[in-house]
Image (cartoon, grey):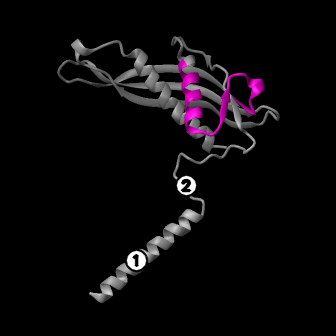
Amino acid sequence: MHRERETGASVLALTMAAVAVIAGCGYRIAGHVNTLPPDVKTIAVPAFQNRTSTYRIEQRLTSAVIHELLVDTRYKVVSSPEDGDAVLYGAVKTVGGGAVVFDPTTGRATTILVTVTMEARLEDRKSGKVLYRNDNFVFREPYEISTDIPSFFEESGPAMDRVSRDFARRLVAEMRESY
């Protein structure tokens, strides 16, 4: 019994030592690392371009990216490129969706897969150096839709808001971590 306590205490001590070493080595939880240059304090986000026929998608995506930058980063966000240390340019190339899951009883779609393809580029305003670039940023996400006809309401607006928020989270995370 005494030996079991010593073994348990040794394992606990080694575990705590390993945690202390890891914590002191700069390891961080994925998604919270910021690798952009430290002199970038303000990011300008002019309205994205829309090369699709999806009405106002560029406004929703621009707004969602601005919100994500404000909520999840330390950056000040402005709309005018002249006022930023860096400028995030974006262009929505395609927006599509298709049913991927159907209700076996009614045959109605229950899940759609939304796909958004975009170009995104973050540039240092003064030097023109590209800090982040992805000419084929593809976002795919399945979303459930209501099959209950009495309670169904037009879901395209709220669905596009959800897509925009999820898209913005992924774009900002990739932008911050890919430099």
Q: Position of residue 79 (x, y in %)?
A: 68, 22
Label ID, residue 11: 1
Residue 115 visible in rendering:
no
- Give the amino acid at mark 2: Arg
Please rate how many residues cluster around mark 1, counting C-alpha atoms within 10 Å: few if below 14, some from 14 to 19, many from 20.
few
| 135 horizontally vs 108: left or right | right
> Which of disc 2 and disc 1 is earlier in sequence?
1
* Helix, strand or loop for disc 2: loop
Q: Is residue 44 above or below residue 179?
A: above
Q: Quadrant of residue 159?
A: top left
Magenta region: 60-88
Residue drawn 55% across and 63% down?
A: 23
Q: Is residue 71 magenta?
A: yes
Q: Position of residue 85 (x, y in %)?
A: 75, 33
Q: Is residue 24 magenta?
A: no
Q: CA distance from mark 1 to mark 2?
A: 24 Å
Label ID, residue 86: none
Q: Position of residue 99 (x, y in %)?
A: 35, 22
Residue drawn 58% across and 65% down?
A: 24
